[in-house]
Image (cartoon, rainbow, N blue to C red):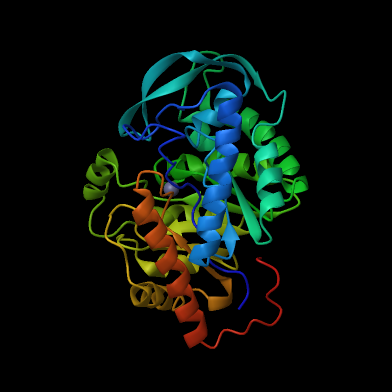
Amino acid sequence: MAPRSTIAGSLPKPPWLASRDQLWAGWIPRGEDLVEAKRDAVRLVVVEQEQAGLDIVTDGEQTRQHFVTTFIEALDGVDAVNRATVQIRRRYAASVPRVVDQVSRTEPVFVDDVGYLRSITDRMVKAQLPGPMTMADTLLDEHYGDREELAMVFAGALNAEAREMADAGADIIQFDEPAFNVFLEEVPRWGITALEKAIEGVDAVTAVHICYGYGVRANIEWKKGLGSEWRQYEVTFPVLADSRVDQVSLEIAGSHVPLEVLELLGDKSVQAGVIDVATDRVETADEVARTLESVTAHIPANRVFPSTNCGMVPLSREVARAKMGVLAAGAALFFDESSVSSSGSSTVE
Ligand code: ZN
């Protein structure tokens, strides 16, 4: 079987690295100890993914406090100290950095992390970056006054980072764009242009992750208001089908996404979320295989990569490990059962 299963990206951090009292908690070690502790944590989560049987591994985002703001804070023109509290994704208040001047990327942010990840595993590696639209929605802008313009500036910075990540050994580079499920009118207008600018010329498989968020209260309340069928993907998938992005990472397990929308993705491959991250209940391998079966009624199996709905950072380490195990086991069960040929499948496109 070709390399297939992978997590969306993040994993919970060990208690010696970051406090578990809150989701985006601060680091516990300081200075050089922190540098070493982050590497130790990456090594640990890589071993855990390998032992679970996953084919494509990530660094579990062990080196970042937050999947969006940590990248923003590394850029020039940003004040990460005197933060602001703003409403993000139209649904909850968050402490965010302020854009106070022209933004530029003067040095690599996660490139060394990718190189380290590449050096400690023989499996395929996936690296994550925030998407430009989601970045523009996770800050207070006091300089540009225009989200589209700011997103394009971010796309330039992301492109430079992504190119270097590919050179450092990333097989897949994924841009996390939960904002694509919220600002539906802006995706075709400029969100997709910004994403394409971010992936331009990147020598790796490119992916975009669009989800309904972690199982935190604000998201659970939001989902309740989305009705019995979640049709946001219906707006964005045709736009993505026409784009240069290779893969779409999306949410299926436990969601109200009507699966026929998958057919709007054209010839893209999908990282199918077959593990619900909004519950501590661990799926069975058989359930995972059945979810994959329902997905492949709409997308050919050779374009399906079993994954999680979203990052697992809010879960306990025990639950996250168990979910990784059934993800790999369910994927193996499904692909062994089905007649998917492994010929010509050494590529993940
Ligand atoms: Zn997500």
Residue 6 in sight? no
Q: Closest to the observer: 172 or 144?
A: 172
* Depth order, front residue of 85/239: 85
Q: Residue at x 61, y 39 (%)?
A: 194
Q: Quadrant of the N terminus?
A: bottom right
| Image location (x, y in percent) of residue 304 | 53, 70
**Looking at the image, which residue is at 69% across and 82% down?**
343
Q: In which quarter of the image is the C terminus?
A: bottom right
> Residue 164's spot in the image, x, y percent?
75, 40
Q: Nearer the viewer, residue 220 or 31?
A: 31
Q: In this view, does 26 lie above or below 325?
A: above
Can residue 190 be seen in this snapshot?
A: yes
Q: Where is residue 296 in the image (x, y as percent from the top left)?
A: 46, 77
Side (left or right) of 195 relative to 292: right
200 up-or-down from 24: above or below: below
Where is residue 333 shown, x and y percent of the image?
A: 45, 80
Picture quadrant where residue 28 is located: top left
Q: Residue at x 28, y 60 (%)?
A: 229
